[in-house]
Image (cartoon, rainbow, N blue to C red):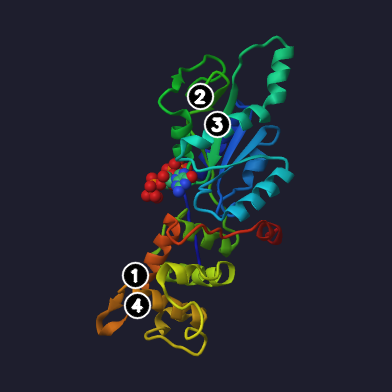
């Protein structure tokens, strides 16, 4: 497997983010709650040093709650403020607001002592593409927000969104690119839809997901597709045209994909399973949450990869 991605403008975006850092008090970093390790670009730790840090575990509605809680603990222990979030829902925004105030309490206190009153906290949103940055800004800011104009000297050329009397948000989010020095990171990013699908790789993604689910979420595939997850699908069974997809994969995973193809009517000429179609169906079901709430990483994975 080889997941590669070459975004343009990477250096320029990074340089801009470095400049923007000078203007802000707080970095609000969005990561995908299903893959908190893989969706996090560690460069942000260097870029955002000396700043207060808030991590939003976004798309938490799609993730396994128990694991999301474990991740929240993991980041809190590292000194971050953390909120679990569905960026599309208005109801989580109050918690974000209070967490911003808490994260910046010292700054607010310092301002007060110096006689500076009502200077809002300035924040910047950062995260990899597709993690939900624009969704978050829209939900948080809502219609009530007012864009403030350029402020000579300090924010020339920058647009700020005044969220309320306490917080101003830099209008353009900082885009970070995922790092894939490890092929597993690329795979998890691909499965969640963070990077573009390569048609040829959909089947590999699906087979990997099946293997992962059998191990970590037994019973969920069975529940969704009404298929046998074990027994009859083990090593000894060899579905038709399996050699086309099997490669390095175990027969059990291929057999399960064949089962999904069968129950969902994904057939090719000659009544053989259409693995590509079944794989796409499975991946779409995962991404939309129809398979259930599933996370693909645990904090131990992050420690292992160090
Ligand atoms: P970006 O600015 O960081 O690039 O991401 P953006 O807000 O555009 O969000 C990407 C997709 O993720 C959007 O789906 C958005 O609705 C979805 N999304 C964002 N936050 C959440 C969340 O907390 N939970 C869930 N379930 N989805 C979230 P989209 O516009 O429909 O795009 P797509 O689904 O067609 O890829």
Question: What is the crowding at mark 4: few (fewer than 14 residues within 10 Å), some, or many (at least 20)?
Answer: some
Q: Residue at x 45, y 68 (%)?
A: 223
Where's residue 234, x and y in %?
51, 85
Tell me the SS state at disc 3. helix
Badge 1 marks a residue whose secondary structure is: helix
Q: Quadrant of the C terminus?
A: bottom right
Of circles 2 and 3, which is in front?
A: 3
> In the image, which disc is placed on residue 262?
4
Res 1 seen here: no
User: In what quadrant does ligand 1 lie?
Assistant: top left
Query: Cα distance, mark 4 to mark 1?
Result: 11 Å
Q: Is residue 106 visible?
A: yes
The residue tagged with tag 4: helix, strand or loop?
helix
Q: Mark 4 or 1 closer to N-term?
A: 4
Q: Which residue is mark 3?
A: 94
Q: Residue at x 71, y 32 (%)?
A: 50
Q: How many marks?
A: 4
Q: CA distance from mark 4 to mark 2?
A: 51 Å
Q: Is residue 167 above or below residue 72?
A: above
Earlier in the chain: of badge 4 and badge 2, it is 2
């Amino acid at each position: 497997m080889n997941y590669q991605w070459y975004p343009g403008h990477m250096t320029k975006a990074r340089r801009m983010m470095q400049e923007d850092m000078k203007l802000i008090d707080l970095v609000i970093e969005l990561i995908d709650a299903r893959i908190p390790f893989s969706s996090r670009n560690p460069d942000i730790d260097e870029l955002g040093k000396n700043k207060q840090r808030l991590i939003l575990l976004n798309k938490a509605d799609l993730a396994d709650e128990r694991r999301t809680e474990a991740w929240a603990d993991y980041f809190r222990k590292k000194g971050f403020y953390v909120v679990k979030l569905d960026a599309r829902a208005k109801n989580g925004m109050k918690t974000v607001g209070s967490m911003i105030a808490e994260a910046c309490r010292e700054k607010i206190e310092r301002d007060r002592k110096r006689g500076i009153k009502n200077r809002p906290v300035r924040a910047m949103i950062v995260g990899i593409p597709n993690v939900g940055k624009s969704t978050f800004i829209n939900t948080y800011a809502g219609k009530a927000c007012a864009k403030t104009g350029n402020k000579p000297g300090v924010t020339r050329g920058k647009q700020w969104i005044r969220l309320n009397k306490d917080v101003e948000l830099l209008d353009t989010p900082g885009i970070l690119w995922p790092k894939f020095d490890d092929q597993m990171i690329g795979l998890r990013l691909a499965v969640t839809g963070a990077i573009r699908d390569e048609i040829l790789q959909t089947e590999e993604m699906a087979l990997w997901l099946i293997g992962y689910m059998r191990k970590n979420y037994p019973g969920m595939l069975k529940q969704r597709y009404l298929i046998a997850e074990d027994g009859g699908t083990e090593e000894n069974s060899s579905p038709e045209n399996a050699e086309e997809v099997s490669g390095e994969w175990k027969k059990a995973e291929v057999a399960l994909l064949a089962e999904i193809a069968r129950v969902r009517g994904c057939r090719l000429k000659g009544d053989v399973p259409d693995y590509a179609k079944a794989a796409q169906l499975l991946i779409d079901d995962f991404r939309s949450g129809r398979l259930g709430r599933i996370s693909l990483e645990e904090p131990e994975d992050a420690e292992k990869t160090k």
